[in-house]
Image: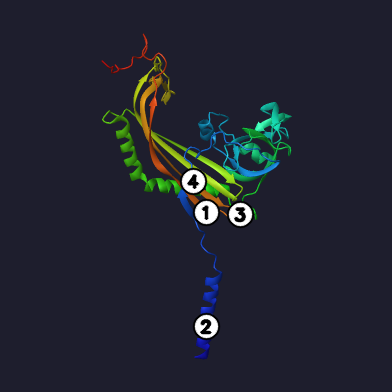
Amino acid sequence: MKHRLLSTLAAFGFAAFGMVFAAPAPQIQEDKAPDRVGYIPKAKYQPVPSRVVGVLVSDVVKVMGNEGRSGPPDAMAFSSGGGSYRWVYVPAINGMPAIIQNLQVKVGAQGDQMRIYPALNMANATTAKDLWGIKGPFALVEVEVNDKLGAPADEGFVATKMTQIDGTRDYPIHATEAVEQGKKRYGQWRAMQQGSIDAALVKAQKDAIADQPVTGPRETNEMVHISWLPDVERLRVRFLTKITDGAYQHGGGVDLEARPVPLPALPIKGGIRPRPQIAPPQRIPGFRWGTQFGVEFGVSYEFDKTGNLAKIQTLPIESFRNMLPPPPNAGGPGRFPLPPQPVDR
């Protein structure tokens, strides 16, 4: 009996010890995004010191295009502090062919100095890996900026050294895994919200065009902005979806003359038999104008440096209505006419 009592007390003690010292479940803060206008940053830059921690991001063309910028489709960009993506130039060394020569780069926090780099490339998966062993489409990195001279609030800088730090003792987070987790969570959230999204689109259509027929097409545009937030040491993965439809008029398109396109010949016994020639329809699209309506929504996820989800911010579903103006002289002679407009009598 005494041994059973001791065993029971010991078991209870170990259980209590486990309850006292078990790691608490991480708390996830949830609220609404405070700023709809700046939810995806536009031309938001800050001076960069000689060394900076941030995230190196691939597949940035769509977000760059939202700011009216463009670049190579395989280029990677850098973001820290929630700022806009910045182009990253890297030295062309070890026999690399340089695509950029004698680039004058503003250096220093104020940009009041200039440095010329004779041979540069854009950061991409190949150059980042060959130079510094950077792996993955998304990487948390420490960057030496412009030979330790820093950079002003501008669209790009030269990375003269780069070290990947995610997956290390100080930063156990794996950036690519966090981004993929964010994508999965956002897909699940969208599926749960589909009824509300559909209802908001119906209301947006009624408010915008009443009983007019919808011409379409319905279009979905999704952007993902990723940044490292150094003040709280979190990786932020922010999604924004915009669904549009409308009652449009079209004009100015050009139908190209259909020209036969020969297909590969078919082998037959004793020779070959040509396949029929096919002329697919070809058209250069023109302009569209009219009333556009739609909805916009999104979710932002923040992962701490251990990789745990720490914060969720939701951008509520909101409808909008835009008027797309006709192109100049749309109703002139020989052009595509506009429909009659009501006048006051």
Of 133 and 45, which appears nearest the observer? Answer: 45
Disc with the residue nearer the chain's start (3 vs 2): 2
Residue 96 in sight from this viewpoint: no
Number of dots carrying numbers: 4
Q: How is the image coloured?
A: rainbow
Q: Residue at x 41, y 44 (%)?
A: 316
Note whether residue 249 is visible.
yes
Q: Is mark 3 on a helix, strand or loop?
A: loop
Q: If the image is split into quadrants, where does the C terminus sit?
A: top left
Q: Distance between the residues labelled 1 and 2?
A: 38 Å
Label 1 vs label 2, nearer the camera? 1
Which residue is denoted by mark 4 in the rendering? 300
Q: Distance between the residues labelled 1 and 3?
A: 15 Å
User: In the drawing, does residue 199 fall left or right of residue 173?
Assistant: left
**Is there CB contact under 8 Å for labels 4 and 3?**
no
Give how far across and how far down residue 40 sits, in percent.
51, 38
Report crowding for label 2: few under 14, some 14 to 19, many 20 or more residues within 10 A (C-alpha). Answer: few
Q: At numbered mark 1, what does the secondary structure look like: helix, strand or loop?
A: strand
Q: Where is residue 189 in the image (x, y as percent from the top left)?
A: 41, 48
Which residue type carries mark 2? Leu
Answer with mark 2 or mark 4, whichever residue precedes in sequence: 2
Q: What residue type is labelled 3?
A: Pro
The CA distance from mark 4 to mark 3 is: 21 Å
The residues bearing labels 3 and 2 have C-alpha atoms spaced at a distance of 38 Å
> Depth check: 139 or 257 in front?
139
Q: Residue 310, which numbered label?
A: 1
Q: In which quarter of the image is residue 80?
A: top right
What residue sits 40% from the left and 45% below the top?
190
- Name the residue carrying label 3: 172
